[in-house]
Image: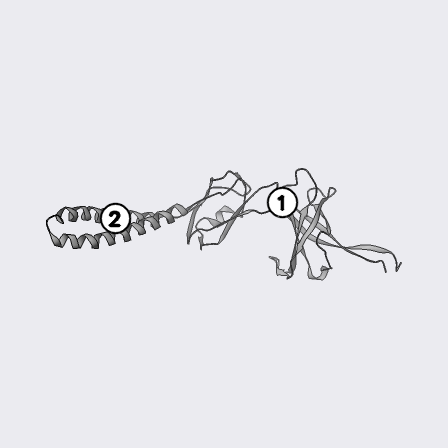
Amino acid sequence: TVFIRVPLSVLAPAELVPLRPAIIRAPLDGVIDSVAVTPNQRVAQHDALFEFDRTNLKNRLQVADRSLATLQAEYRQEAQQALYEQASKTQLAVLQGEIAEKEAEVSYLRELNARGLVSSPRDGLVLFGDPNEWVGRPVVTGERVMMVADEHAVEVEAWLSPADAIPLEHGAAVKLYLNAEPLQPVAARLSYVAHEAIERPDGHYAYRVRANLTESGQPPRVGLKGTAKVHGEDVSLA
């Protein structure tokens, strides 16, 4: 038996995750007022996803617009008087600076207001948690809110326990046994294993493993879970 070689393999919990999804992050600091989609809903590019509470922004924009209109009216009045009064010519330069400053403020507020309505950058499925958990929740710029992904572009993500961390090579064979179809495993090839274990929601540490599907045809949909069998190097049966 010393000379008999058998493949070493390990099992790891796994699921099908999106391949190169579009990550939707908060474009500004604020409170999410409403969510326009539901989890796993199909959306088209430019469809609304969620909206911030823009009440304060809209009020600030209205005040800035009125201030700008007042300055512009004052400038026109001074411009007429400048034909006859030297003092008005001096005031014109001051007003021009104030108008430029207020125009910049209005432009900035309009941009912020436009960012308050977040739309999808592509066609695909919207992937996120419970919408009710996001409504009324304050978020900061750059915080991840949801993903939009092609449901047919998927890869295998598995979590390998440190106790089962065997030597694995790039391109090693992987079989995913889905809970929904355990008798029809999905074939894949190992693309990478994380060099460091991270803490999972259950409190245990594990290495992230990714594998690319190798079968042709339409793959199973994103989100399906199962168990991955990852094949390592051949070892002696002894």
Whether residue 233 sits left or right of residue 20 in the image: it is right
Q: Is residue 53 left or right of residue 193?
A: left
Residue at the image point whose x is 11% and y is 51% from the top: 85
The residue closer to the viewer here, 93 or 224, is: 93
Decide: few, some or many residues near mark 2? Use Cα within 10 Å; few <14, some 14-19, many ≥20: many
Say what amino acid the circle numbered 2 marks.
Leu
Color scheme of the displayed model: one colour
Label for residue 54?
A: none
Q: Is residue 58 visible?
A: yes
Residue type at numbered disc 1: Val
Quadrant (top left/top right/bottom left/bottom right) for the N terminus: bottom right
Using the image as rendered, state which of residue 130 and residue 85 is in the foreground.
85
- Report if residue 203 is visible in the image: no
Give the CA distance from mark 1 to mark 2: 52 Å
Label whose residue precedes the other's in the sequence (1 or 2): 2
Q: Residue at x 25, y 48 (%)?
A: 68
Mark in front: 1 vs 2 = 2
- Tell me residue 168's x, y (percent): 72, 57
In the depicted structure, whether residue 201 falls above or below residue 65 = below
Q: Position of residue 15 (x, y in %)?
A: 65, 48
> Can you identify the residue that label 1 sits on?
154
Q: Which residue is mark 2?
A: 68
Measuring from the top left, give residue 38's x and y in whole percent: 51, 42
- Regarding mark 1 in the picture, which secondary structure is present there? strand
